[in-house]
């Protein structure tokens, strides 16, 4: 349990490196043991299985000791900083430095106490452990995120992900089972592929609201083409090409109207949804409904029990992973990626170094259309029937994934890696809420309430007086 | 002459000329504070209006306009709510406006169901307070947490649309008694119209304040506003409070429209309100948005759906609506790119004048569309005989449409539509009452146009002689009118009840008849 790598990034490593005194160590050990003891006793009282109790006990003790060492070290550092000047006492210093986090922690504890007293059966070992994990994660996030000035959003996202997953795994039966993880990854793959375009476009400071309509259009159009007798692979290629073409149109139309990109893409989205439905309902009696059989390979591509080269997960996940890796690496090393970032940060200077603004703008939208069409095609394999409204939920979810991940909507900051984290956080959160037995409306409510603080942790813009 | 010889004086004169030119420029800028971005919504509005009245004359009846007002009022007020916050800048497009309307709607219905609120005063107070409170929190988050407003609104969208379904899982409930007949939309002068007019009037009053100037300054450049001492925190909060009040009014109109509670219907207002706002020539970046543009944008959206509903596309009706909706949106946005060019060609573009010219043209088209051409010979014959009363006219026009027209008396046929042969007492009284109204309306329009020109001229020439002339002419006309009124006052002793005057009151009787025919 060495804290050398952790303290290496601190502002004044010498001060903080001083080891704790013996008394403090013993005190921490005793407190940790008492805490673990409480956990173990309550675990037995709640008839939990022995393995889980042991696991939880070890985890609690380790985390506690580490936090004790680390956090106390921090406080000591502050205390020694101010030992010499006769300022306010250490407690007051502590209070003024950590006022808001402490108030927040106290509020969480108070909420937990109130819930324990009012809701019968709430005060169980799992909830106590969940609380401890939550607190630990909050403290760690707060303490550690200083070392991640660059990628703070990714760090916080990962912490939230780990916390949610561990709490979910303990509280909900079958949360950490293979099936559930597979289904979470599958839905994350859909959302992730749909958010590719939104991420790229956001990097340039635009928005693409036509994604859900392209998804719906591709979903219906692919089935329509297949039902016409076009070979499925050719139909898929046609749909993807049309998706990219629609993206190009989007980009060209919105290039001159960048401030209003939100509305332009919404308008083209409406037009696309209407147009696709008109085309598919010509000559049929069923307006808007397309019937046909989805080929086996397509449904294998994205159904829950699909296999990838004999491995037990649907290929959609593999596609997503491949796309994510290509994008994350590609955005870092290729000229295209670098130029995209350059344009997002500063248009003027980027165009001064001969980066064609319109080419990148249009190509970002083209990629957006392509990946939206791909998502639509994969969703057809998943559901087995064409439905124009299949993408409706992605209208705001793609935006939420991008924002939660930490890509700035103003452009230039972020990347697809962040969006992947955002997608996973949203997916695990929604799975967690489903596991708790909450229905759709409560899920959405909690989603809404959680997005704001998560974004507020890292995407706060500076005060106006610092920009003058 | 001396000035021409003296370089110093000449220099002073040129200086004065220069300063005067600068002053002129400033004044011209003030006089032309018109918004050229209104060009597109006005054009679209009248194009759609003419098309709509040609396709379906039933729009221009009391019933048609009444139901249009009922349907369009929530959308218009929602657009106003967006407008108030969009002006504040930082791309404050409040995506949560739809769920907020839904939230106020469902809580209103539930609270009314519990018997807590029921009287009009409490309902209005509650709706406006709820909207304002939400927007107040919104503003505090934007100001102090400093997260991008669009993220806050996204968060609010998800949270509110979730909680709406919790509060009222499925559509149902009853609106308070007093607003149940508001949603019928039978007459033009429903309370809904007055709510909308009051909202517009209050906003126009608000635009006269310094607060509004601050708001626009902050919206177009927040840094400049901050450095020049604009108190940006109260201004932003104020903009959001106004937006919340508009949202509350929108929720009341929405509740009146559906006469019940609906948790998910309100959510759809988000996208169409943003669309209406942009169609009305507002800039989502902030600083540029206006109440007339927003109102026209909302009306345009209604007219688009109305016009499309008059075509019969069979099963693909709703898809065509989507397609046309999206295309018109994109095309009208692309056309706004032309505005700078137009502005360069016509530096003193006056939306008001443009509006008036277009409205005259469209009134002609509306008259034409509602006009009963088939009844012409019939009317001519009636004039010739001077026998048939107008009451019977309405019954006789129907067979006349089927039977071949008789010999046409040309002068009578031409005059017929304008002068209905035998005017009965009621129509005469109606006409007496409506005549002065129409006259004064025309007078007001003329005076407005002249004043507009005068102000523009005054900016360049620094004289208000023309204005004085206009006011004097107006006074003379007014006095003349009063004198004729004093003479004519004894003619009709008992004017009919005011309720009979609505919509087409200014038109003549055959028009009215043909409108009734059309509505059948």
Image: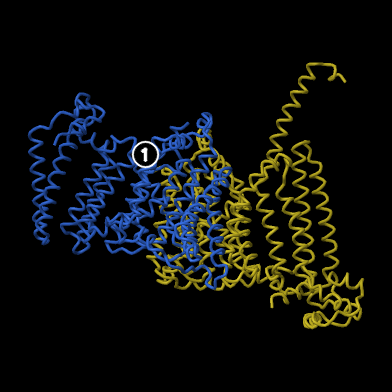
Chain colours: A blue, B yellow
Of A382 and B2, nearer the camera is A382
Q: Is the residue B472 above or below the residue B399 in the image?
A: above
Of B361 and B234, nearer the camera is B361
Q: Measured from the top left, where is residue A411 in percent x and y? A: 45, 40
Q: Measured from the top left, where is residue B409 in percent x and y? A: 92, 75
Give me the residue at 8% from left, 51% from top.
A37
Q: Is the residue A367 above or below the residue B5 in the image?
A: below
- Left or right: A116 with respect to B96? left
- Left or right: A172 with respect to A194? left
Circle 1 sits on which residue? A329
* Placement of the N terminus of chain A among the 4 image quadrants: top left
Chain identifier of the residue bearing label 1 in the image: A
User: Residue B312: in sight, yes or no?
Assistant: yes
Q: Measured from the top left, where is residue B389 in percent x and y? A: 83, 81
- Left or right: A108 with respect to B356? left
User: Residue A184: in sight, yes or no?
Assistant: no
Dot 1 lies on which element?
helix
Query: Quadrant of residue B79 in the image?
Result: bottom right
Query: Quadrant of residue A414 in the image?
Result: top left
Q: Measured from the top left, where is residue A284 in percent x and y? A: 55, 71
Of A299 and A121, nearer the camera is A299
**Circle count:** 1
Of B185 and A375, nearer the camera is A375
User: Badge 1 local density, few (<14 within 10 Å), some, or many (20+)?
Assistant: some
């Amino acid at each position: 349990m060495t804290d050398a790598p952790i303290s290496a990034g601190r502002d004044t490593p010498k001060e903080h490196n001083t080891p704790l005194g013996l008394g403090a160590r013993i005190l921490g050990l005793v407190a940790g043991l008492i805490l673990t003891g409480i956990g173990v006793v309550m675990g037995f009282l709640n008839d939990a299985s022995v393995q889980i109790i042991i696991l939880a006990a070890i985890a609690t003790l380790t985390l506690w000791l580490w936090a004790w060492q680390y956090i106390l070290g921090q406080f000591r550092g502050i205390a020694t900083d101010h030992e010499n000047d006769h300022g306010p006492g250490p407690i007051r210093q502590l209070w003024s430095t950590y006022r808001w986090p402490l108030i927040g922690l106290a509020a969480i504890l108070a909420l937990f106490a109130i819930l324990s007293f009012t809701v019968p059966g709430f005060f169980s070992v799992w909830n106590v452990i969940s609380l401890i994990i939550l607190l630990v994660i909050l403290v760690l996030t707060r303490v550690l995120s200083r070392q991640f000035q660059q990628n703070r959003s990714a760090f916080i996202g990962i912490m939230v992900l780990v916390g949610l997953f561990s709490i979910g795994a303990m509280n909900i039966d079958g949360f950490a089972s293979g099936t559930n993880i597979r289904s979470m990854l599958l839905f994350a793959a859909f959302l992730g592929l749909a958010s590719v375009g939104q991420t790229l476009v956001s990097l340039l400071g635009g928005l693409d609201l036509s994604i859900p309509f392209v998804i719906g259009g591709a979903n219906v159009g692919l089935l329509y083409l297949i039902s016409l007798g076009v070979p499925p692979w050719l139909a898929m290629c046609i749909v993807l090409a049309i998706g990219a073409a629609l993206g190009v149109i989007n980009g060209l139309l919105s290039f001159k109207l960048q401030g209003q990109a939100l509305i332009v893409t919404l308008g083209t989205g409406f037009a696309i949804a209407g147009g696709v439905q008109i085309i598919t309902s010509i000559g049929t009696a069923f307006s808007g409904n397309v019937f046909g059989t989805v080929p086996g390979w397509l449904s294998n591509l994205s159904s829950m029990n699909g296999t990838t080269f004999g491995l037990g997960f649907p290929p959609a996940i593999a596609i997503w992973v491949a796309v994510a890796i290509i994008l994350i690496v590609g955005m870092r090393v290729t000229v295209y990626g670098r130029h995209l970032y350059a344009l997002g940060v500063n248009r003027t200077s980027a165009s001064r170094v001969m980066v064609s603004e319109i080419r990148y703008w249009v190509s970002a939208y083209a990629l957006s259309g392509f990946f939206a069409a791909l998502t639509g095609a994969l969703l057809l394999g998943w559901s087995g029937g064409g439905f124009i409204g299949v993408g409706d939920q992605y209208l705001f979810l793609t935006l939420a994934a991008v924002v939660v991940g930490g890509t700035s909507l103003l452009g230039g900051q972020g990347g697809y890696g962040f969006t992947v984290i955002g997608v996973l956080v949203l997916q695990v959160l929604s799975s967690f809420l489903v596991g708790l037995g909450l229905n759709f409306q409560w899920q959405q409510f909690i989603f809404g309430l959680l997005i704001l603080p998560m974004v507020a942790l890292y995407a706060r813009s500076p005060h106006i007086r610092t920009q003058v | 002459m001396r000035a021409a010889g003296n370089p110093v004086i000449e220099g002073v004169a040129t200086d004065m000329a220069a300063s005067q030119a600068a002053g002129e420029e400033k004044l011209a800028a003030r006089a032309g504070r018109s918004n050229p971005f209104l060009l597109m919504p006005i054009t679209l509005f009248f194009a759609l209006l003419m098309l709509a009245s040609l396709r379906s004359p039933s729009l221009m009846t009391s019933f048609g306009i009444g139901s249009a007002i009922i349907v369009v009022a929530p959308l218009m007020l929602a657009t106003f709510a967006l407008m108030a916050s969009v002006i504040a800048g930082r791309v404050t497009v409040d995506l949560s406006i739809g769920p907020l309307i839904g939230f106020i709607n469902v809580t209103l219905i539930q609270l009314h169901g519990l018997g807590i609120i029921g009287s009009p005063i409490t309902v209005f107070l509650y709706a406006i307070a709820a909207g304002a409170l939400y927007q107040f929190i919104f503003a505090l988050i934007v100001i102090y947490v400093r997260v991008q407003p669009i993220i806050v609104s996204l968060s609010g969208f998800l949270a509110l649309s979730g909680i709406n379904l919790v509060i009222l899982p499925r559509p149902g409930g009853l609106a308070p008694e007093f607003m149940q007949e508001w949603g019928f939309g039978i007459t033009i002068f429903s309370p809904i119209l007055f709510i909308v007019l009051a909202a517009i009037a209050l906003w126009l009053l608000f635009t006269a304040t310094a607060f509004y100037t601050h708001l626009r300054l902050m919206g177009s450049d927040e840094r400049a506003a901050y450095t020049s001492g604009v108190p940006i925190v109260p201004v932003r909060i104020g903009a959001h409070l106004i937006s919340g009040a508009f949202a509350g009014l929108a929720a009341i109109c929405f509740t009146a429209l559906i006469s019940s509670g609906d948790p998910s219907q309100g959510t759809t207002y988000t996208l169409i309100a943003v669309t209406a706002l942009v169609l009305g020539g507002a800039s989502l970046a902030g600083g540029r948005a206006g109440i007339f543009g927003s109102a026209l944008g909302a009306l345009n959206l209604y007219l688009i759906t109305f016009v499309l509903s008059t075509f019969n596309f069979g099963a693909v009706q709703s898809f065509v609506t989507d397609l046309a909706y999206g295309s018109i949106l994109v095309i009208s946005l692309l056309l706004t790119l032309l505005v700078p060019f137009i502005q360069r060609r016509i530096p003193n573009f006056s939306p008001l004048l443009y509006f008036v010219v277009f409205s005259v043209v469209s009134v002609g088209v509306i008259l034409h569309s509602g006009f009963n051409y088939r009844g012409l010979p019939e009317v001519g014959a009636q004039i010739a005989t001077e026998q048939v009363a107008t009451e019977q006219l309405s019954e006789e026009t129907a067979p006349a449409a089927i039977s071949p027209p008789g010999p046409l008396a040309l002068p009578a046929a031409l005059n017929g539509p304008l002068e209905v042969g035998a005017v009965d007492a009621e129509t005469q009284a109606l006409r007496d009452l409506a005549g002065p109204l129409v006259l004064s309306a025309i007078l007001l329009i003329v005076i407005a146009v002249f004043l507009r020109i005068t102000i523009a001229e005054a900016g360049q020439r620094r004289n208000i002689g023309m204005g004085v002339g206009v006011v004097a002419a107006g006074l003379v006309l007014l006095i003349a009118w009063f004198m004729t009124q004093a003479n004519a006052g004894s003619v009709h002793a008992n004017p009919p009840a005011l309720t009979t005057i609505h919509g087409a009151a200014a038109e003549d009787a055959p028009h009215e008849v043909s409108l009734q025919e059309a509505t059948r």
